[in-house]
Amino acid sequence: MKNTFKLSLAAILVSSAMTLTLASLSLTMKKATSLSAVTSSLTSTIKIVR
């Protein structure tokens, strides 16, 4: 049960992170700095999930 809960929680976190990433990407498509910031925040989110 705990593993299933952790997996679903991780899936929710990843999907929300992807949604945020896509939203911020569409908002700041021309800025390379914000792109790298989004990438680093997404990487840190994945590390937290693991």
Image (cartoon, helix red, strand yellow):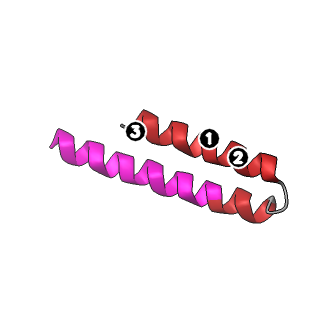
Please tell me in which quadrant of the rendered image residue 19 appears.
bottom right
Q: In this view, does 40 lie above or below 23?
A: above
What amino acid does circle 1 point to?
A: Ser
User: Does 1 sit above or below residue 28?
Assistant: above
Return the x and y of residue 17 as percentages of the image width and height.
Answer: 55, 51
Q: Residue at 79% x, 52% y: name it.
A: 32
Give the percent coordinates (x, y) of residue 1: 15, 44
Dot 2: few (<14), some (14–19), or many (≥20) neighbours within 10 Å?
Answer: few
Residue 18 sits inside the magenta stretch: yes
Asked whether disc 1 touches disc 2, contact meaning CB atoms under 8 Å apart, the reply is: yes
Asked whether the residues under the numbered discs 3 and 2 touch, taking CB atoms below 8 Å apart as contact, a structural biologist would say no
- Image disc number at residue 40: 1
Quadrant holding the C terminus: top left
Q: Which amino acid does label 2 sit on?
A: Ser
Q: Are marks 3 and 1 in contact (CB under 8 Å)?
A: no
Return the disc, 3 or 1, that comes first in the chain's sequence: 1
Magenta stretch holds residue 7: yes
Range of magenta residues? 1-21
Q: Is the magenta stretch mostly helix, strand or loop?
A: helix
- The residues bearing labels 1 and 2 have C-alpha atoms spaced at a distance of 6 Å
Q: Name the residue under label 3.
A: 49
User: Badge 3: few (under 14), some or many (20 or more) residues near its Cα, within 10 Å?
Assistant: some
Of labels 3 and 2, the one closer to you: 2
